[in-house]
Image (cartoon, rainbow, N blue to C red):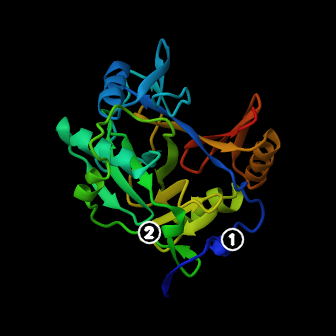
Amino acid sequence: MTTSQVPESAEGQHGIRPREYRLPESTHLGSVRLQVADLERSVLFYERFLGMRVINRAENSVGLGAYGEDREIVHLRQLESARPVPKRGLLGLYHFAILLPDRASLGRFVAHLAAIGVRAGMSDHFVSEAVYLTDPDGLGIEVYADRPRDAWRYDERQLHMTTNHLDVDDLVRSAGDEKWTGMPPGTVLGHVHLYVDDIDKAEAFYHDALGFDKVVWSYPGALFLSAGGYHHHLGTNTWAKGAPRATDADARLLEWEIIVPTPSDAKEAARHVREAGYAVKQEGGEWVLTDPWGTSLRLVAETR
């Protein structure tokens, strides 16, 4: 296959659309809800290391987001007996990914990590540049910035993504002299990446039933899906195959939010998932769906 840059007018020709229901183009993500063992320890981590701020607090839970905005990105719920994630992982969360608004912000974040002595994994994915951390319970986190869409490339219908060495020095230079002061306005939940034990089952649930487009499908042991031509709102992989599922006794991803334009969009997506034979329940005007590995997602309308 030849790799070439593709104009915006050809975007609709890329990826593989589901045969029936398809999520709306403007679909995006809302927040993740995580179960942790020690709420105060986790809040300290998210504030000091990631630069998030507390937006709301209850007896056993805390919501965090970026500075200058009240949008919740991460919600923590405490279960003191929660077991940490083992090194090989559990079926469920691989990582959730926080998208910064620009490359300079990511450069400032990397410089901040270096200044406080935090080691992190780093990769250049061609469509984005990314930094990887784990929280105190072993839950995976990515912090990243996208490259402009007109710089993305396609191998025929498939988006070109890589896992290459990140040019850290150039990234930090992009920050100029400005220091990291916390996650800036415009920071959002960019994607969620899950461990599964079968890619075909993941495709059946997330592509055929829920309606995400397939975007990258030849990456070894992985499948990447999205709405609206994004590089991915969801990654799935079998790299922890043989690991058990996360349970209610574990530090884990409790659920993640998918935001669709209207209540009728949420209802239609939920209907299609239910008719495909998967667990669906309604909570008020929202819908909670459960994938084959017990991971829940919540369909929420933008106009709720």
Of all residues, the one furthest to the front in this rendering is 177
User: Element at badge 2?
Assistant: loop
Decide: is 23 above or below 176: below
At label 2, which amino acid type do we have? Met
Residue occupying the point 36% across, 24% down: 43
At label 1, which amino acid type do we have? Gly
Along the polypeptide, which appears first: circle 2 or circle 1?
Answer: 1
Question: What residue is disc 1 on?
Answer: 12
Of all residues, the one furthest to the bottom in this rendering is 1
Quadrant occupied by the C terminus: top right
User: Element at badge 1?
Assistant: helix
User: Badge 1 local density, few (<14 within 10 Å), some, or many (20+)?
Assistant: few
Residue occupying the point 55% across, 43% down: 295
Residue nearest the observer in this picture, 219 or 153: 153
Decide: is 164 above or below 90: below
Residue nearest the observer in this picture, 212 or 111: 111
Question: What residue is disc 2 on?
Answer: 161
